[in-house]
Amino acid sequence: MTKRKLQRFAENSTFDHFFQPYYHELISGFRLRGKWNSDFFKNENPLVVELGCGKGEFTVGLGRKYPEKNFIGIDVKGARLWRGAKTTDDENLPNIAFIRRQVEHLEHLFAPGEVDEIWITFPVPQIKNTAVKKRLTSPQFLNRYRKVAKTSTIIHLKTDNTMFFDYTLEVIQEQNLPLLFMSYDIYENPDHQDVTSIQTHYENIFAAKGETIKYLKFILH
């Protein structure tokens, strides 16, 4: 492990908005599960979660843009999360937090009905057929989201991968979920600046390669 990574891991532990609970803490009962608004954010604003948030640019961008909502970015890579956590600390943004855990542990991090909205931004597409269950929009993951989301929660997806995008559309159709919007090139839709005004590190890389950015949103019930 590089010295830089070690420094970032050490700094992560000093941020009061950065959480990396051990597995035994999750199983025995994570202290903020069901209490994010009351005990951490100290308000009753809607709670929005970004899954696989990487460096946290999108979580931070949303937090800046919508101070009337609370945002939590989740990723398993602590060195990546450091960037978003550091920016949040530098700018003293009170409506943002980060969690270092696998998405599979959502139901241990949040109580039933605690999450109002979910963003999935540029996830690993898991293109192999043997990895279908690992796709973050698979039926298996949608069922995980149902355990923590409010009724009729909106899920957003941004991706450069056409296969993953088409797969998600198929799942939405198979489960008869209301599709609110979809585009194979969101930058052709100027009315959706809430989606295009915040670019992630990976989004810029994909766009530079000429990849179109796909976006959709649907209601989970």
Image (cartoon, rainbow, N blue to C red):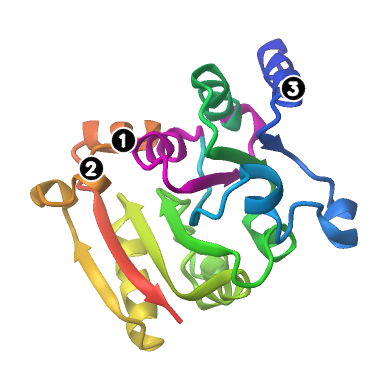
Crowd band around label 3 with a 10 angstrom C-alpha radius: few (<14), some (14–19), many (20+):
few
Q: Are marks 1 and 2 in contact (CB under 8 Å)?
A: yes
Q: Residue at x 22, y 67 (%)?
A: 181
The kind of residue on which mark 1 rests is: Gln
Q: Is residue 87 left or right of residue 33?
A: left
Instruction: Determine whether the residue tagged by mark 2 lies in a helix, strand or loop.
Output: helix
Crowd band around label 2 with a 10 angstrom C-alpha radius: few (<14), some (14–19), many (20+):
some
Q: Residue at x 61, y 71 (%)?
A: 144
Instruction: Determine whether the residue tagged by mark 1 lies in a helix, strand or loop.
Output: loop
Relative height, residue 66 to residue 23 (above, below): above
Crowd band around label 1 with a 10 angstrom C-alpha radius: few (<14), some (14–19), many (20+):
some
Image quarter of the N terminus: top right
The residue segment tinted magenta is: 55-80
Q: Residue at x 61, y 39 (%)?
A: 98
Tell me, yes or no, whether the highlighted magenta stretch contains residue 71: yes
Q: CA distance from mark 1 to mark 2?
A: 7 Å
Kindly report which numbered mark, 3 or 1, lies closer to the viewer in this rendering. 3
Q: Which residue is at the front of the view, 171 or 81? A: 81
Tell me, yes or no, whether the highlighted magenta stretch contains residue 68: yes
Residue with the mark numbered 3: 14
The number of discs equals 3
The kind of residue on which mark 2 rests is: Thr
Residue with the mark numbered 1: 199
Residue with the mark numbered 2: 196
Q: Residue at x 55, y 33 (%)?
A: 94
